[in-house]
Image: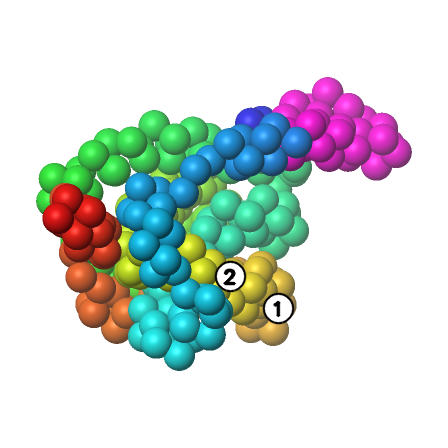
Amino acid sequence: MAAGMVTILEVTLSDAAMHAWGWRIPFLVAGPLGLIGLWLRSKLEDTPAFRALEAKAEVSDSPLKDVLTKHWRPIMVCIGLVLFYNVAVYTVLFYMPTYLQTTLELEATPALLYVLGMMLVIMFVIIPVGALSDRIGRKPLIVTSCIGFILLSYPAFLLLDSSTVWGTVLGLVILALLLVMLLGTMSATLPALFDTEVRYGGFSIGYNISTSIFGGTAPAILAWLVTATGNNAFPGVYLAVASVISLAAVFVVKESAGKPLPGAVQTSVSSTV
């Protein structure tokens, strides 16, 4: 919806109007949506497993200390997984419009339409990918995506740099299909790394540290690499390197599809007893 809104504004407004006031419209829309999100979040309840721990007074008095001293291994695994996950997300979804316009010198409207089309492909594919992960496991899809980024990231950016319609479409489709295997599985995989009593804290710390260091910096680093090397396909190298670094974390992850979250079985059994 965000990409579609920006595309519509880009098509319907002149450059002067867009710079004068049009750019404010998405922010004005996002404000009320933020309030709706806050209301939805206030209605969420803790899981039955966590409430059972609270009832038995087994919730830590110093959860931050406990998660950093006793559960640092899953945090490191989380950081490793999120490293290439968010580098891929920030590169393929957030950096791509800038890359198409600034580096490949496409006009704004075609560049946004390309990215919007890629997002639509992801939307239609992500549910079947999630269903597939329930059947064959999440780990095989994550491994496939990781190896796919290692082997295909650079060729995909070479296709983008070809400056042809079919090259651009094929390059974006390759990146989208590799990314959707992460988008359809990581949201279920990462929380399963942690026990019930530290799940929210451990996941939040690992995810946000990795996102801020590796994901949030990715667009700036990619733009600098393209300028420094003069190679428009170099973002593919950065994606591949991030995937290689994260491969060790991928292999140590235990399969979680079709299994209860850590701590859920013990809590339910003890509650029954």
Q: Quadrant of residue 23?
A: top right
- Residue in the image at 71% along x and 32% along y: 31
- Could you tell whether 139 is left or right of 81 in the image? left
Callout 1 amino acid: Trp
Q: Position of residue 24 (x, y in %)?
A: 79, 33
Q: Which residues are magenta?
A: 5-34
| Residue furthest top in the image | 12
Q: Quadrant of the N terminus?
A: top right
Residue at mark 2: 208
Badge 1 marks a residue whose secondary structure is: helix
Q: Position of residue 201 (x, y in %)?
A: 45, 60
- Could you tell whether 97 is left or right of 140 in the image? right
From this view, report whether residue 252 is shown above or below residue 95: below
Q: Residues within 10 Å of mark 2 (few under 14, many from 20)?
A: some
Q: Residues within 10 Å of mark 1 (few under 14, many from 20)?
A: few
Residue 8 vs residue 258, the one in the foreground = 258
In front of the other: label 2 or label 1? 2
Q: Position of residue 79 (x, y in %)?
A: 40, 67
Labels 2 and 1: the sequence-earlier one: 2
Residue at mark 1: 224
